[in-house]
Image (cartoon, grey):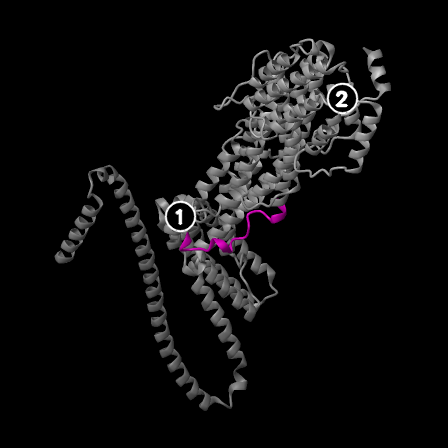
Amino acid sequence: MEETSREAVATAVQRVAGMLQRSDQLDKVEQYRRREARKKASVEARLKAAIQSQLDGVRTGLTQLHSALLDVKNIQNSLADVSKDWRQSINTIENLKDVKDAVVQHSQLASAVENLKNIFSVPEIVAETQQVIEQAELLQAHRKLMELECSRDDLMYEQYRMDSKNTSDMNLISIYFEDVQGLSDELAKQLWMVLQRSMLTVRRDPTMLVSVVRIIEREEKIDRRMVDRKKQTGFIPPGRPKRWKDKMFQVLEATVSTRIEGTQPVTKEADKMWLVRLLEITRKYVLDDLLVVKNLMVQCFPPHYRTFNRFFSLYHNAVSSRVQELVSEDLEANEIVSLLTWVLNTYKSVEMMGHPDLLSECDINQLEPLLPQEMVDDLLGKYVKTFTSNITGWLRKALETDKKDWHKDVEPEADQDGYYQTTLPAIVFQMFEQNLQVAAQIDGDFKEQVLKLCLKQMNTFLIRYREQALTYKEEHLRDRQLPQCYVQYMIAVINNCQTFKESVTSLKRKYAPSLESTDSDGAIDKTLNEVAKEGCQFLLDEVFLDLEHHLNELLTRKWLAGSHAVDTICMTVEDYFSDFNKIKKPFNQEMTSEALRRVVVEYIQAVMQKRITFKNADERREGAERMIKEADQFKFLFRKLSAGEDTDQLCGAIAAIAEVFKLTDPTLLFLEVTTLVSKYPDIREEHIQALLAVRGDASREMRQMIIGVLSESKVSFSGVTRPIFKDITVPTMTSMATAKLLK
């Protein structure tokens, strides 16, 4: 014994040393002590239950063996006597009927005398039983209750055997033992109370829970025995079968349901985060309770109860019912997301039912879904509907806010590269980003669905954006002094289009890299390009409104006399393009190229309008030299502005026309015109006639000859470069007269 004690002490020392290897573990001494105390209490409870069960079994076995031995001896003696008497009295049996009846009556009277002692002690036992029930001594109370029930049932059974139709005696017995049923109900209430507090009881006093289970098991055995006897004799005592085992499971189920339903700490009106708090509390309660079941409660129930699996199912069903109740409430969009994220992700994660300590006891893949798929689809549909409504409102509000900024007297902000921009793209895509992050928590497919919805809403939004930009331009044209920063904000609109493009690409790459292009994608790109190009066109219209007066001076007598119209045009264009440099690529280069084309077209259009007719060779030479000089001015300016490869081709058209005017020998005019046509094959007959008319020295026969020869040898247009003369019209005499009248 001493050696065993020493070994236990050594083992304990070694265990404590293992726990306290580091200094910081000293803070956990109290925690270790409580854990060891719980383990010790659990082991002692199991030992007590096992020993008690063994002792009861041994006691019952010994009693039965002793009774059996006596019965066997008595039966053996009786059989011997009966056999002897039978052989001696076989002929006189028929004459002993009266004796037989007397024996039966004697037996009944003997049984009554035997039970008199118990019958007279019933009130005393009832009082004792009531007292031990109140003292929560459940096993002792049940033992006394079984004694009372046994006395009552035996008396009733004997009465039933004597005269099953005699209800008055049966009622007399029932009235005498009427307090027994009340005791049974009182004991049952105590049992259900312990079961309702089983999570707390198993931590503090697991032996109490073990006692409850033992009592219920005993009652189940008595129920089975009474049911079997009923099949044989037709008699069953009142109150049987009790079915306490079924009632126990019902109580446990109700307890779990109450536990889950009572997790709501605050109301929806009191706290906007009520659902998040409720779900977190539910998660914690379920996990903690299942860990208690696994570590403590399973030891208090027989193995065939499959206690952990039963509780696992109870909690799953209770949570499922609670979640379905929440679905029936009028949830907002963010609450729907919180609920679905919890149901689809958190519930089976390691934070809850998939906790590592629970996986060894159950398979979470076998669990039925918390919500039927129809409910999930309904919630998702409700969320999408609410999200669509919300995002439409958000986008409309964002656009209205941006429109107000367009009328400010200060320039828009610039990004780190100096490009003008507004906050609209950042606001819009922050909305999209937030909702996509939320959708990603629910499901990958739903995330793609939300992304498609965002892109669809984006397309609708851009159509409104385009309409507002057009309205902004029209308002400006009614009073070009307002808004003061019209050009800068129109540049910001153009830059926003490029930012929108980049943001859409970023969203798709981040949230749906494998998503194929949809109709919405193409529509978005098309609308953004149209908005940007229209914005560029609006800005160029603004430029050419300022240039209109100076363009009207070109190829006029004033121009020939020494006008500074082209100088002013170049200075104005350069001034505007100091702002246009803040347009992002590729729109800035496209705009520069378009500006050059429009300047050249307007210049050539001035030639075709025949505003001047040169009177002599000196005027033609002077005009041609001025045109060549101005072409070089345009070329220098737009090279400086990086207009692109078409600069020489476009400016060269002015110089080529100037060469036609500069030619002094009319006989070579055909060759010069042919050269012009070969360079610019889109030039038409009316263009040639207008040039010859401006030149002023070509006879009618020469014009007809040149036109006729060129018509026969028409040069085909290759289409490699964009045509110039295609966009230039030659006014008729009627239209020119009308224009003069209007002026």
At 61% from the left and 27% from the top, the residue drawn is: 648
Determine if residue 576 is in view.
Answer: yes
Mark 1, residues whose alpha carbon is within 10 Å: few (<14), some, or many (≥20)? some
**For the view shown, which residue lies furthest in the right direction?**
734
Numbered disc 1: secondary structure: helix
Quarter occupied by the N terminus: bottom left
State which region is magenta: 359-375
User: Is the C-beta separation of discs 2 and 1 under 8 Å?
Assistant: no
- Label 2 sits on residue: 608
Residue 362 in the magenta stretch? The answer is yes
Q: Which mark is residue 129?
A: none
The stretch drawn in magenta includes residue 425: no
| Foreground residue among 82 and 201 | 201
At which x and y percent is residue 234? 57, 67
> Residue 310: x and y, percent?
47, 54
- Which residue does the numbered mark 1 point to in the structure image? 291
Give above or below for 187 relative to 96. above
Find the distance from the CA under tag 2 to the CA under tag 1.
94 Å
**Amino acid beneath label 1:** Leu
Q: Find residue 660 and report its horizontal and vertical position in percent.
A: 71, 24
Amino acid on which disc 2 is placed: Met
| Rendered-image quadrant of the C terminus | top right
